[in-house]
Image: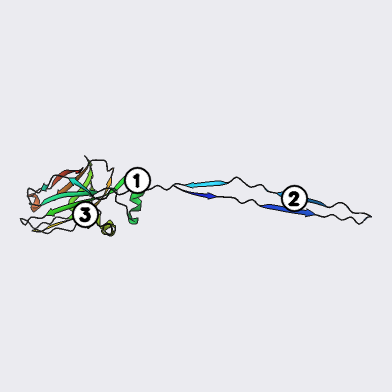
Amino acid sequence: MRTSKLTLVPAAVAAAALLLSGCGGSDDSESSTKTTSAAPTEEATTEATEAPASSGEVAVTADKITDDKLGHTIQAEAIVRSFPFPESMSAVEERGDTELVLVKVKATAAEKYYASVTGGDFRVGPKDAELPATQTTSTVETEMKAAGYEPFEDVKPGTSGEGWVAFAVRDASDPLFFTYKRLAYNGGDIPEKEFVVELTPKG
């Protein structure tokens, strides 16, 4: 807590008047001094609300996701809680009910269909959240890289990749859940489906 003190410095004002008489005598000099008393010292205290410290990278245990139609595999490996909000997200931070969460994801995109795995396929939220948070990686990409968290990039068919995905999660109570959302393909022959796993910190 930072305290700043404001002090009022005493000030004195003196006045003297000399009255002279012209009729056979002189009056005694009369002087008067006026002093203003110092006002009580005023202390102003400013309290700064500090944001929660980032948890740093924490490994998690989570079931491996295997897309039963596309053949993709996805594994959530680690999490960072309370990552600092960038200036561009100050309005979200001031709302007070949102936490910036990073999740490290490793993925392999199968070659069966021409379908990539992207950060937009993922969601994070508390249990039974009606609207789990979608990624906001592009907004915090610069800050993530500066902190050593390489952002997740699209994984093309027949390749693998890993990286971090950012989520602005409202009401981020424990435990958090990670969702891979498969969109519908081929006119609905491959239906939309969500795969949900719990993110359990190790240790």
Relative to 12, is 110 on the left or the right? left
Q: In 3D space, how far apart are the residues under numbered discs 2 and 3 (Cα atoms)?
A: 75 Å
State the image coordinates of residue 177 (x, y, percent, origin top left): 20, 43
User: Would you name the residue on which mark 2 appears?
Assistant: 33
User: Would you name the residue on which mark 3 appears?
Assistant: 164
Q: In 3D space, how far apart are the residues under numbered discs 1 and 2 (Cα atoms)?
A: 58 Å
Secondary structure category for the residue under label 1: loop
Verify CB contact (< 8 Å) between mark 1 and mark 2.
no
Among the two numbered marks 1 and 3 on one chain, the one whose residue lies closer to the N terminus: 1
Q: Please tell me which residue lies in front, 117 or 45.
A: 45
Instruction: Look at 22% across and 47% down and name the residue there.
Output: 124
Instruction: Look at 53% across and 49% down and name the residue there.
Output: 5
Among the two numbered marks 1 and 2 on one chain, the one whose residue lies closer to the N terminus: 2
- Circle 1 or circle 2, nearest the eye: 2
User: Would you name the residue on which mark 1 appears?
Assistant: 96
The amino acid pointed to by label 3 is Trp
Relative to 149, is 51 on the left or the right? right
Q: Residue furthest front?
A: 203
Q: Residue furthest left?
A: 112
